[in-house]
Amino acid sequence: MNLSGTVVSLLLNMHNIPLRNLVVFHDELELGFGTLRWKIGGGHKGHNGIRNISERCGSDYNRFRVGIGRPSGSAEVSKFVLGAFTPKEKKTFENFIFPVVHQTIPWIIQSNNDKVCGILKETSLLKSSKLSEQF
């Protein structure tokens, strides 16, 4: 992911896709595990992949941020980010995150911000009650 800006730029140009139609999904340390956020544009917050895409393409694209939380204790961030998910975390992706992503992509492409925000708000409420049962 760290050098994906080159490929993303190539694909956008090759297929004449406007930057506003690009949707990038990425991990976000600053959000708790399983938290989903969507925004257009902004800085990279130290995320090397987002930095590279923004350098190559510009920064005004859709970002679907998937919270992974911060490592506990003195764990190294790079090892944490590249590490494997636990079975419970994998289940969260299957049951909550993937379905929400599938549901929101058409609305993101159509720039229906209200619909996207509504889906994410509903999902956050549902996720928090269901996750508390699992953990």
Image (cartoon, rainbow, N blue to C red):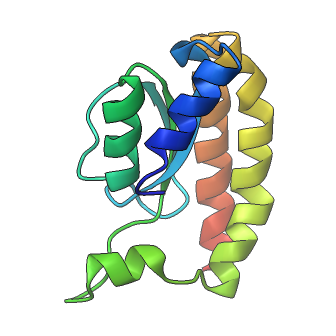
| Spot occupied by residue 1 in the image (x, y as percentages of width and height) | 49, 57
| Spot occupied by residue 50 in the image (x, y as percentages of width and height) | 38, 44
Please tell me whether residue 20 is drawn above or below residue 120 in the rendered image: above
Which of the 4 quarters of the picture holds residue 93? bottom right
Which of the 4 quarters of the picture holds residue 84? bottom right
35 and 134: which is toward the camera: 35
Which of the 4 quarters of the picture holds residue 103? top right
Which quadrant of the rendered structure holds the C terminus? Answer: bottom right
Question: Residue 91 vs residue 51: left or right?
Answer: right
Query: At 19% across and 89% down in the image, what residue appears?
Result: 74
Query: At 72% across and 30% down in the image, what residue appears?
Result: 104
Please tell me whether residue 34 is drawn above or below residue 20 in the rendered image: below
| Spot occupied by residue 91 in the image (x, y as percentages of width and height) | 74, 73
Whether residue 81 is visible, yes or no, is yes
Query: At 68% across and 30% down in the image, what residue appears?
Result: 119
In this view, the residue farthest toward the bottom is 74
